Amino acid sequence: MLNISKKNPITENIDQYSTVKSLANRPHYKILNKIIVYVSLIGVIILFLPWTQNISGSGAVTTLKPNQRPQTIQSAIAGRIEKWYVQEGDYVKKGDTILFISEIKEDYFDPNLVQNTKSQVDAKKMAGQSYGGKVTSLEAQINAIENERVLKLQQAQNKIRQSLLKVKSDSMDLEAVKTQIKIANTQFNRSVTLNKEGLKPLTDVEEKRLKLQEVEAKIITQENKLLASKNELINAKVEINRISAEYAEKASKARSDQFTALSSQYDTEAQVNKLQNQYVNYQIRNGMYYIKAPQDGYVNRAIQSGIGETIKEGTQIVSIMPAKYDIAVETYVSPTDLPLIHKGEKVRIWFDGWPTIVFSGWPNMSYGTFGGKIVAIENFISPNGKFRVLIAPDEKEDAWPKQISIGSGAQTLALLDNVPIWFELWRTLNGFPPNYYQPKGETSKEKK
């Protein structure tokens, strides 16, 4: 066994050597000890200095608004390239012609297609107006028939009243004749009685008999007149029904013709609308032969080239970069860091190719970084497995360099909570995420 518990004679006698004594008396060892002590104290003090937690990300320079980003111009119709008016690198204004294409579909080969369609529209409009005139004429005819029917009915009703009055008159005449028969019969009987008694001659009896026979003949004539008057009354009533049926038939026929004309008019109007739609479509299609710039910008690249090349609908022709745009940075953060990102939060950015010295925990000591603020956070994960964050320039800080190009790389630091350095070292060594950070603005709103 090792004799560890006993005193080591080497350590006890080492101080008696002159070399050891000379080394112990050298002054730079004392200075080194002091340096070590001071450095240790400074290191301990540094451990308690504030450190800004942050989330790093990488992305690229883009534009703030979608309409300011590089875009491609497509052809809305199929055609054949006939002439180019621009070349790559040219500056174009909104509405400037980029190229001209010709028609390749046989339905649109006619150069007078628009004019012919316009003539068809005018002809159909005139046909519709004719049907409208026919409808108006039939309406006037129906009104005339109705007026005539009213007059005829009034005439027939007057005839009924006349017949009714004649029936009453004949009835009164018949009653008068009946009264005359009674009187004649009474006189005849009285004459016969007086003749038998010898008070009246036989001639008087014969006169009374003759008068009675005349009155009896007269009653038959009067009855015939009454029956004729009643027949006239019945005929007048039948005439009213005949007039109503006749003019109802005439009005129905006129209304049927009117409805037929209305149907033709509506059908013509539908055809006019269809032709007008075709006419407008042809006009718009003629305007699509000239591919124009949708906004001011520069022609980056001609995707299609040559003369006589056939293109389909939706084919990309040229790429244009807008002349005016608001610069921004899109960066990507991991899903674990997404809850720590908030809209309106401050972000430090440095761009590729721009001289930069970065201290991630001390952003105030960094050089070449620019300020930004988060304006949008994507809620759906991107194909790279991270969430997209859009950053705009911070108006309160220095402007971003004008030399930055769209699409160049950028690095970002989202500034979070301030913690001591020892805590950040401890968190990093243990693999813990940064502290959950809530902006002061949102906290105050929740309290309110």
Image (tube, rainbow, N blue to C red):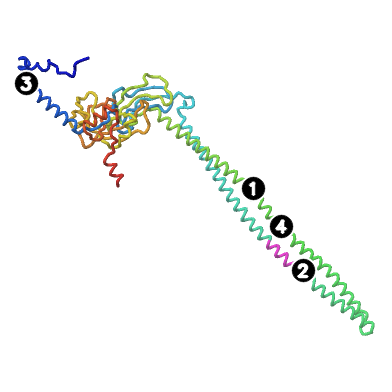
Q: Residue 247: x and y, percent?
A: 66, 53
- Which of the 4 image quadrants contains residue 42? top left
Spatial CA span between label 4 and label 2? 22 Å
Crowd around label 2: few <14 · some 14–19 · many ≥20 (10 Å): many
In this orientation, which residue lies closer to the viewer: 49 or 333?
49
Cβ atoms under marks 4 and 3 closer than 8 Å: no
- Which of the 4 image quadrants contains residue 232? bottom right
Report which residue position mark 1 lands on: 253
Spatial CA span between label 4 and label 1? 21 Å
Residue type at tag 2: Asp
Report which residue position mark 4 lands on: 239
| Residue at the image point whose x is 36% and y is 27% from the top | 385
| 11 up-or-down from 38: above or below | above
Q: Which badge, 4 or 3, is on the more N-terminal residue?
A: 3
Residue type at tag 3: His
Q: In which quarter of the image is the N terminus?
A: top left
For the record, the magenta segment spans 157-168
